[in-house]
Amino acid sequence: MHILMNRFFWITLICFAFVLSNSTKAQMISHKSKIQVHKAWARATPPYTKNAAIYMILKNNNSANDLLLGVQTTVAKVVELHTVTEEKGMMSMYPVKNISIPAHGTVVLKPGGYHMMLVNLKRQLKVGNHVTLTLQFKHAGEVKLKVPVHKSQRDIHEHHEMKHD
């Protein structure tokens, strides 16, 4: 009986850990693209904030360059692609038309660089929630995913990496 209870304990613990780990990482909804998305996360917002940022790593497994053309979501009126540059000691953020992902290459969307800006949020982004996105690529087409909301980049762990085919 003791062995049976011990086995039940470990199975329950493993299942709980699996559920918990899956709730904090981005989840692909569509898997047909040659683009892989890793370590995607949205920054949590205080109440009544109108804008938020989303970050991720985009990996192009295709033999041709691709372009991220746009993003759709239901949590904001508009999603803009942005970048940050430094000129004469001043940091400036501005929208870009697209983000190029080289063939067999990677682009990192991160604070202080390329990112997705959710403009005119329809609701607060709270830690533990997810944001559903549709990424539109010139060649790879649409990639749909659910992105977890975190307080900061430090809240993301290496084992929360998302891979897809």
Image (cartoon, grey):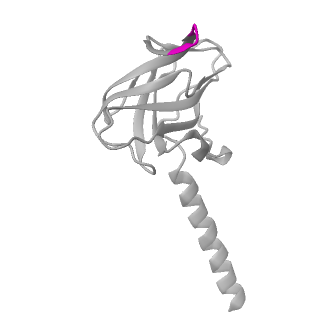
Identify which residue, 33 or 110, lies in the foreground.
110
Res 40 visible = yes
Q: Which of the 4 image quadrants contains residue 153?
A: top right
The answer to whether 101 appears left or right of 54 in the picture is right
The number of discs equals 0
Task: Report the residue that reaches farthest toward the bottom.
Answer: 1
Q: Which residue is painted at 27% across and 37% down in the image?
A: 122
Q: Which residue is painted at 54% across and 36% down in the image?
A: 40
Let me know if residue 88 is in the magenta part. yes
Q: Quadrant of the C terminus?
A: top right
Residue 3, compared with residue 64, is above or below; it is below
The answer to whether 130 appears left or right of 102 in the picture is left
Residue 129, compared with residue 73, is above or below; it is below
Task: Report the residue that reaches farthest toward the right.
Answer: 3
Chief secondary structure of the magenta portion = strand
Res 67 visible = no
Identify which residue, 154 or 20, lies in the foreground.
154
Task: Report the residue that reaches farthest toward the front.
Answer: 89
The answer to whether 143 appears left or right of 120 in the picture is right
User: Which stretch appears magenta?
Assistant: 87-91
Give x and y (percent) for residue 49: 33, 36
Q: Which residue is painted at 52% across and 35% down in the image?
A: 31
Give x and y (percent) for residue 84: 52, 17
Give x and y (percent) for residue 41: 51, 38
Let me know if residue 92 is in the magenta part. no
Give x and y (percent) for residue 33: 53, 27
The answer to whether 117 appears left or right of 89 in the picture is left
Q: Quadrant of the N terminus?
A: bottom right
Q: Which of the 4 image quadrants contains residue 7?
A: bottom right
Identify which residue, 51 or 156, lies in the foreground.
51
